[in-house]
Amino acid sequence: MKHLHGLFTDAASVARLTACGLSLLGLPAISHATADAPEAVFMAFYQHVADHDCAAAVALAEGYTLADCQNVQSLTPPPMPNNIMVSRNNRITFQTQLDYTNKNPAATYSCDYAVTVQRRQQWRVIMPAKALKACLPSSSAPLPLTPAEQLPAVPPQPDKTADQTKPAAPPPPALPAAQAKPTNSLLGLWPAEVLRGKPGEERITHLAKPNVDPPDYLEAPTKLPALAEAWQHSIRRVRLPADKPLVALTFDLCEQADDVTGYDRDIVNYLRDQQIPATFFAGGKWMRSHPDKTQQLMADPNFEIGNHGWTHGNLRVLGGQKMRNQITWTQAEYAIQRDNLNAKAQQAGLAAQMQHIPHQPMTLRFPYGTCNKASLEAVNGLGLAAIQWDVVSGDAAPRIAPTALANGVIRQARSGSIIVFHANGRGHGTAAALPKIVSALQAKGLHFVTVSQLLQAGSVETVQDCYEMRPGDNQYIDAKFGEGTQ
């Protein structure tokens, strides 16, 4: 094969290859292949990697380096791609099996991947490819299942009166994020200065044309177990025993189709510096816009991520497939980002640490805090616990003063509270108010936990509707925002 090296570094050479038939490489020909055939670029790229012709491989891919290619000890060229997962005008995602051996760390893999080929001026393979589930060396024993992958026993039936803010039955088995986690070295995948972030990351950009593209695949490869009945309906807070004075800080990371929202590094840095657990309810599009930040939040042992809709859609107005897409696309994007984190962890020899990262979010916060019977049933039916709040920080108001924000939260918060903030550039005054809030709540004897840990510690208080502080107080949302996605 040496005589073929270097022939396929541009579109013209791909055309020559496909016109002659891929059988020259021992591969089947594509009868309709041209310089613009994504299948041809896919096949040529992996053949170059298999031949160790790294310069040619890099020329046909984005996000792929000579070092990446040179780390491949061997690769079996995959068959002609015929399983299309997603197809849009200039972007096609194929499902394929890849069998390869890496040099460092030395390991052999055989896994199913989603491989995207995208056309800007020419078709290019977009790297890294995304494993459709955790991809472990074939010589390794599988990682133990996380609790998210085990069907929990159904707890005793809760008293139906619990739907009127009375405590429900004892909590079901723990969510994955509620398990004790060791010190997690995954944060070491990033230099300290990268984790700290840069000034201006909180800024919001408005798009001239809404981005309505779906994720690379439309549903997560793994499904959640059935949600225990005790956690059905809309959870507002948790009733706790006297010896467990706990409270959950939550931060929404929403993003609509017509904007790219920010990342408030001052909030995250303060929480990290103080080792304070927190839950981030992230939109699927936000995760796609902020892949590194999403993976850093996943990697932090004090944080967990919940679902906050794809583009912050109003699930009281949206119905049918539009409603479902808001939920399932976000689950899928989380899986994509987790796969990318897993690839980094494997490269760094930290694959075992991934067992502490849930494969799926187990909770969802309704955008705008709005729902109806149909959307509640859809969310719960997909295995997600619907998390509302009982303390509103008010940080969505642009002119709120940090002192007023802090005083309001301190006054309202009590054991079992779920407090809602924002960390996407719309958390006005939150970073400045957090030190005062944390200090005052600690002085009250309260301890901070994630939402999953809070749910596990007591009995949830649920209602059959979604509202801000009183039933019916958010009815204006529908007329003001409609579907709410832009």
Image (tube, rainbow, N blue to C red):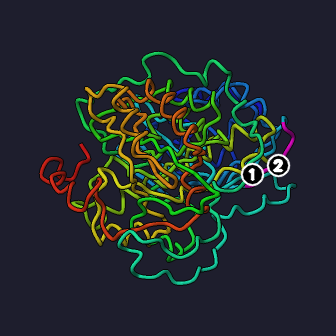
- Foreground pick, 103 / 348: 348
Residue ID at (59%, 44%): 445
Task: Identify the main secondary structure in magenta.
Answer: strand
Secondary structure beneath dot 2 equals: strand
- Foreground pick, 471 / 155: 471
Q: Name the residue under label 2.
A: 108
- Foreground pick, 25 / 205: 205
Q: Nearer the viewer, mark 1 or mark 2?
A: 2
Assess whether residue 106 is covered by the magenta stretch.
Answer: yes
Residue ID at (23%, 42%): 486
Quarter of the image where the N terminus is located:
top right
Q: Write down the region rendered in magenta.
A: 105-110
Q: Where is residue 402 in the image (x, y as percent from the top left)?
A: 37, 26
User: Extreme top residue here?
Assistant: 199
Residue ID at (31%, 65%): 321
Q: Residues within 10 Å of mark 2 (few under 14, many from 20)?
A: some
On the picture, is 279 further left or further right than 50?
A: left
